[in-house]
Image (cartoon, helix red, strand yellow):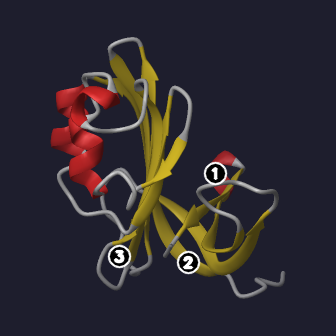
């Protein structure tokens, strides 16, 4: 069997509904390399909203009350490289007063932690089509395959 450049890694995936303060405490307490936010009527890059601190101040009120765009923060996607051996991606979407969160982590070191599944990964270059305001053109990603769940996805990296 050919591996086409895939390397062995370890994968963690969490999906759950959380309150805004739990989203902040569990996930927004770290720096993220890049990402996007979507409000009621527009999208902004993580940089445009002032980084993670900008996201935090928009979690519980209308964004314009805090100097942001019109409407509520509806969803976001953030990603980062954690040291030399891990990639993380966070997606969150508003559910009434709470947020539905999906968190993915790829550990590239060869030791397994409890709760992680074996996976395979490789560097990939993807291309975002269309005239999107936040991202377009080349987007550097990591392709991840988790055979046990027949799952294939891409974690964004860089900006």
N-terminal of the pair, mark 1 or mark 3, is: 3
Which residue is disc 1 drawn over?
148
Q: Which residue is mark 3?
A: 111
Pinpoint residue 43: horizontal percent, then vertical percent. 54, 43
Earlier residue among tags 2 and 3 = 2
Q: Is residue 33 above or below residue 50?
A: below
How far apart in space, not on screen, are marks 1 and 3 (Cα)? 18 Å
38 in relation to 115, above or below: above
Secondary structure of the residue carrying tag 1 is helix
- Image spot of residue 7 (x, y percent): 60, 82
Q: Residue at x 59, y 56 (%)?
A: 134
Residue 25: image quadrant is top left
Q: Which of the 4 quarters of the picture holds residue 50?
A: bottom left
Q: Is residue 14 visible?
A: yes
| Image quadrant assignment for residue 14 | top left
* Residue 8: image tag: 2
Q: Nearer the viewer, residue 146 or 99?
A: 99
On screen, residue 140 versus residue 126, left or right, reads left
The answer, for residue 12, to whether it is visible in the render is no
Residue 146: % across, % down: 62, 58
């Amino acid at each position: 069997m050919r591996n086409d450049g895939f390397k062995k890694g370890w994968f963690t995936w969490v999906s759950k509904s959380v309150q805004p303060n739990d989203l902040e405490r569990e996930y927004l307490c770290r720096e993220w390399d890049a990402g996007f936010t979507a409000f009621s009527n527009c999208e902004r890059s993580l940089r445009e909203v002032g980084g993670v601190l900008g996201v935090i101040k928009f979690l519980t009120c209308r964004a314009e009350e805090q100097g942001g765009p019109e409407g509520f923060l509806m969803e976001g996607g953030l990603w980062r490289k954690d040291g030399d051996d891990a990639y993380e991606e966070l997606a969150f979407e508003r559910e009434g007063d709470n947020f539905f969160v999906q968190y993915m982590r790829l550990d590239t070191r060869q030791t397994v932690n409890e709760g992680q599944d074996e996976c395979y990964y490789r560097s990939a270059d993807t291309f975002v089509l269309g005239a999107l305001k936040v991202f377009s053109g080349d987007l550097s990603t990591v392709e991840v395959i988790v055979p046990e769940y027949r799952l294939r996805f891409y974690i964004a990296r860089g900006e």
